[in-house]
Amino acid sequence: MSVFTGAGVAIITPFKENGDVDYEKFAENIELQIAGGTDAILVCGTTGEASTLSHEEHLEVVGFCVKQVAGRLPVIAGTGSNCTATAIYLSQEAEKLGADAVLVVSPYYNKATQQGLYEHFKMIADSIKIPVILYNIPGRTGVNIQPKTIVRLCKDVENIVGVKDATGDLSQTAHLLALADGCVDVYSGNDDQIVPMLALGGKGVLSVLSNVAPRQTHEICAKYFEGDVEGSRKMQLEAIPLIDALFCEVNPIPVKKAMNLLGDKGGTVRRPLTEMEPEHAKVLEEEMKKYGLI
């Protein structure tokens, strides 16, 4: 059973000027996502700046999101770490808080062999009952979860159900889905590859774009699943200039700027991230206008 099908938002964590989590803005953003037709919410992922949250803040944000959503759609908690014990702790606590699933990134910096990755993910999944989605983003972690390892995990461990594929390598994705024979739910981790991923058999996207365009991102997926492939393709291509602008600096700097351009919904970023460079912000604003967001 898939955790969700369609467009899930990798939601931002808004911060006040003093660095505290802005829960009022966060609640507003959650409601905007639900009203916009988002199919799931990923909280405390890369876009949610989980790496600069303390463990206490991390779990407080997860718990707040679960309560605010109140069962209206699935909440997926980012709980990954390059320390297996820490990832187990965060996953167990997220389950207690009511998360519907967890997203677990591959260990970064210290990396691991493919066998090490297998044991890491299996230990985490064995410690909880809710579904686990693997997160493969070698551009950030420096390690690639190979297709054989992903398939092995999904076959061997009942509650490991899929992967957020942010490799950008559609050839690897094709090989993964060929090996999987239906046992792996694949979600695009790149907004510019939603339709290609769906064409290969993907279940949807975990999206940065959805923060500013939840209805449109949902429709890209919905149209494809309804058989309107041409309509889906057209919407995907129309969004490319905006997607490029949302990734012209490291995520989530641009998307937070975009949310502020929509009406002070993004808040600030925590160091080491900095505010968007003015020349990039100008391009982003222009693309948001062209896309009809402002």
Image (cartoon, rainbow, N blue to C red):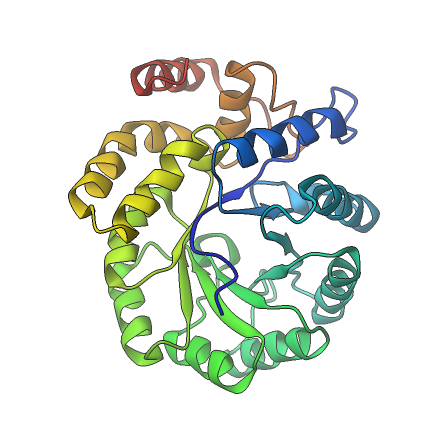
- Toward which corner of the image does residue 121 lie, by quadrant? bottom right
Residue 219: percent from left, percent from top: 34, 39
- Toward which corner of the image does residue 16 lie, by quadrant? top right
User: Is residue 244 at least partly visible in the picture?
Assistant: yes
Q: How many marks?
A: 0
> Residue at the spot x=35%, y=14% of the render?
289
Viewer-closest of 38 and 249: 38
Q: In this rendering, is residue 207 above or below 82?
A: above
> Residue at the spot x=57%, y=22% of the render?
275
Residue, far left: 230
Viewer-closest of 48 and 33: 33
Residue 18: percent from left, percent from top: 79, 22
Residue, far right: 56
Image quarter (top left, top right, bottom left or bottom right) of the C terminus:
top left
User: Is residue 22 at least partly visible in the picture?
Assistant: no
Q: In this rendering, is residue 54 above or below 110?
A: above
Viewer-closest of 260 and 227: 227
> Residue at the spot x=30%, y=59% of the render?
169
- Toward which corner of the image does residue 122 lie, by quadrant? bottom right
| Residue 7 left/right relative to 241 | right
Residue 115: percent from left, percent from top: 53, 83
Residue 170: percent from left, percent from top: 27, 59
